[in-house]
Amino acid sequence: MNLDFDINEFMENFSKSCNKVQIKKFNKGEVITNYIQKRNQFCMLMDGSADLVRYDYNGNKTIIEHFTKGNAFGEIFYTINTNNEFFVEAKKSSKVLFFKYDDIKTMCSKNCTFHRTLEEKLPEIILNKVIDLNTRIELLTKRTIRDKLLGYFNTLSTRTFSKTISMEMSLTNLADYLSIDRSAMMRELKDLKEEGFIKKVGDKIVLLHK
Amino acid sequence: MNLDFDINEFMENFSKSCNKVQIKKFNKGEVITNYIQKRNQFCMLMDGSADLVRYDYNGNKTIIEHFTKGNAFGEIFYTINTNNEFFVEAKKSSKVLFFKYDDIKTMCSKNCTFHRTLEEKLPEIILNKVIDLNTRIELLTKRTIRDKLLGYFNTLSTRTFSKTISMEMSLTNLADYLSIDRSAMMRELKDLKEEGFIKKVGDKIVLLHK
DNA sequence: ACAAAATAGTTGCAAATGCAACACAAACTT
DNA sequence: AAGTTTGTGTTGCATTTGCAACTATTTTGT
């Protein structure tokens, strides 16, 4: 299987020529889209970063997914119901590509390269998402805050081939991502330091093999 | 979007004629596959039911996914590492279709209908998996045992258009699926009954709108 | 440069959850 | 039909986690 396809390079070059596609820019903090309506929207983050966020009836914030360059998102991936109202929020200045899922199959008037390539690569794009979601489930099913934290650090470490981890989100957001209480997480982080599992070096966290 | 494609009907009719595909039968309790090696295996459950299971270093069992007829699974959906060793276990007598992901793209010698249809429907098959996984994440990110239980019941209720829910797994397995302690779950279940959120009728659970 | 907002860090206490150990019932095995 | 295994239901107690309320620090906006 080849997952090395550089979707970004392709997007940059061809998306502008297709009349079924929209590209929009967003500033930090702006809402990119919400998942309430049923529009079969398929989005791709071309630049920046964004979070898919849910607030429950208690005001608990959960970061369902964290997107970086190349990630796909949108209503197409969800069964929307009244109990889950999501929105995607830009965490940095971001560039987002929008189109409708059905438009991928129905060739556009120009029969453009964008369409053909997108249709061809679609399984891989979605497969990448499945792999991301499974990694996320792997984390969420861990039973303790400690295991979730170590699991998260390990995932980042494996991804970057380094024991030194640059955090891709604030600790406050990390708690919302791991679906745990922030202060309880800080306490566990302190214990992990004291017990020699991790250490903080500047704004990075170093995983100590223990 | 059309997700109504009946993969099962198709599989039954055509899979036998393709030389890249294997069909195997399994009895309850047998291991269908494990996810340790890297074979790009893509599987589809044609009949029966099965669980994707992980045991952690403490012996905690987690049911990562529960598969019924038509669900896809296999290594192709995972980044395998040493910290997660999974296997898929048949919960009933099951029939499973096996093939390698790469073989979908490389047409088989017969250029058979099975291949062509599978390639065409692949995005939808994987998209269905994404939707399932997102539903699962929705459950796992809920903060309390109560919310997980109610969320689970609601999902089943929505899926079957009924407030009366036939459990698709034992309560013991449900606890492993929701990644919570069984006795704590039983306690919460009792409280939910006493507070009038649910009631038990025979082997079914009825959701009371409260 | 200053104020405001967001993030990090900490703590005591309450509440929720997990653990261990039961008894009992139902379902499979031979 | 008896024994074994698996699932249900329950409880006391220990531990973990969440909540609330702070202070200190860093970042952002004007």
Image (cartoon, coloured by chain):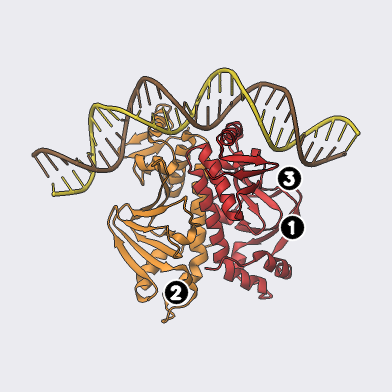
Chain colours: A red, B orange, C yellow, D brown
| Disc 1 + disc 3, Cβ < 8 Å | no
Q: Is residue B69 above or below residue A207?
A: below
Q: What residue sits right under mark 3 in the picture?
A: A29
**Would residue D28 be found to the left or right of residue B114 on screen?**
right
Amino acid type, mark 1 = Lys
Q: To which residue does mark 2 refer?
A: B115
Are the residues flagged by discs 1 and 3 from a single subunit?
A: yes
Q: Is residue A178 above or below residue B73?
A: above
Gap between marks 1 and 2 measured at Cα: 38 Å
Looking at the rendered structure, the secondary structure element under dot 2 is helix
Q: Is residue B27 above or below residue B97?
A: above
Give the structural element (helix, strand or loop) at label 1: strand
Q: Chain of mark 2?
A: B
Q: Crowding near pointer 2: few (<14 within 10 Å), some, many (20+)?
A: many
Q: Quadrant of residue B180?
A: top left
Q: Residue at (40%, 40%) from the top-left corner?
A: B175
Whether residue B164 is visible to the viewer of this picture, yes or no, is no
Residue A24's label in the rendered image is 1
Mark closest to the chain's N terminus, 1 or 3: 1
